[in-house]
Image: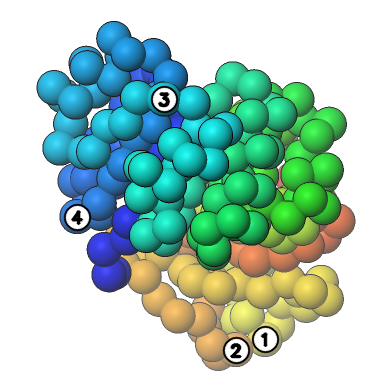
Amino acid sequence: MASLRIMLVGGGKPVYFLARSFISKGHGVTIVNSDQEECAWLARKLKALVVHGDATQPRLLADAGVQDVDVLLAATLRDEDNLAICQSAAKQFGVRRTLALVNDPELEAVFHDLGVTDAFSMTQVLTGLIERRVETEGVLNLLPLGGGKVNLTEIVLDEDAPVVGKTLMDVRMPEDSLVACIFREGNPLVPRGSTMLLARDRLVILSLPENYGQILRMLTGEKG
């Protein structure tokens, strides 16, 4: 993957760990933070450009080099600030991909409607993950994509799963869903219609949210 120029706006451990992860993968990171002491700490800990100031001010964003970044993530504790930062980056500086943390989950759709490329609510993400894990141990994770319009789900087939021993062409998946990949004994496999499903296969499913329950019942026998 080509290296990206990423701007993170906000503070705290989440921004620190995000920055550290991006840097470890070879991406260039700029952090904008309104707390001077935290900026000094981040500058000591990370190989990143750390800028102290209020990112809701377009002049500060320009001075920090927002016009040169590929991605901006606004992750402050104020939803209105995150929205303003993303809108300014996109409209005034041409940043093509803006992401915003939405602290109030009811505002997630509003952010999308107002032009933020991707808005995510940790409340919604964690609620979904917890609910799905409680429902069945066969679901390893559930990741909403495109603002929750598509789900990427990983399902483990137990020995008594109803589809074990069948080929994919024999499994009538719901419309608007597909098995994108199978992990078998740790190795990825791009499935075909003739691919037989085996116990302990990990299926990566791409689907619409409304199909989730039907897919779960079909593949594992569990209720979704």
Mark 4 or mark 3: which is in front?
3
**Amino acid type at image mark 1:** Met
Q: Are marks 2 and 1 in contact (CB under 8 Å)?
A: yes
The numbered disc on residue 181 is none
**Amino acid type at image mark 4:** Gly
Q: Give neighbour class at mark 4: few <14, some 14-19, many 20+ (Cα, 10 Å).
A: few
Mark 2 or mark 4: which is in front?
4
Please report whichever mark, 4 or 3, sits nearer to the chain's N-terminal start: 4
Q: Describe residue 114's horizontal placement relative to residue 120 as left or right.
A: right
Q: Is residue 111 above or below residue 181?
A: above
The numbered disc on residue 169 is 1
How far separated are the C-alphas under marks 4 and 1? 41 Å
Percent position of residue 183, x then y: 41, 64
How far separated are the C-alphas under marks 2 and 1? 5 Å
Mark 1 or mark 3: which is in front?
3
Percent position of residue 145, x then y: 65, 56
Q: Among all residues in the image, which is located at the extreme front? A: 59
The residue at 50%/81% (across/down) is 191
Percent position of residue 105, x then y: 77, 30
The numbered disc on residue 53 is 3
Please report whichever mark, 2 or 1, sits nearer to the chain's N-terminal start: 1
Which residue lies under the disc numbered 4?
A: 26
Please report whichever mark, 1 or 3, sits nearer to the chain's N-terminal start: 3
Q: Are marks 1 and 3 in contact (CB under 8 Å)?
A: no
Who is closer to the viewer here, 53 or 177?
53
> Is residue 112 in view?
yes
The residue at 37%/60% (across/down) is 68
Q: Is residue 30 above or below residue 115?
A: above
Mark 2 or mark 3: which is in front?
3
Which residue lies under the disc numbered 2?
A: 193
Q: Give neighbour class at mark 3: few <14, some 14-19, many 20+ (Cα, 10 Å).
A: some
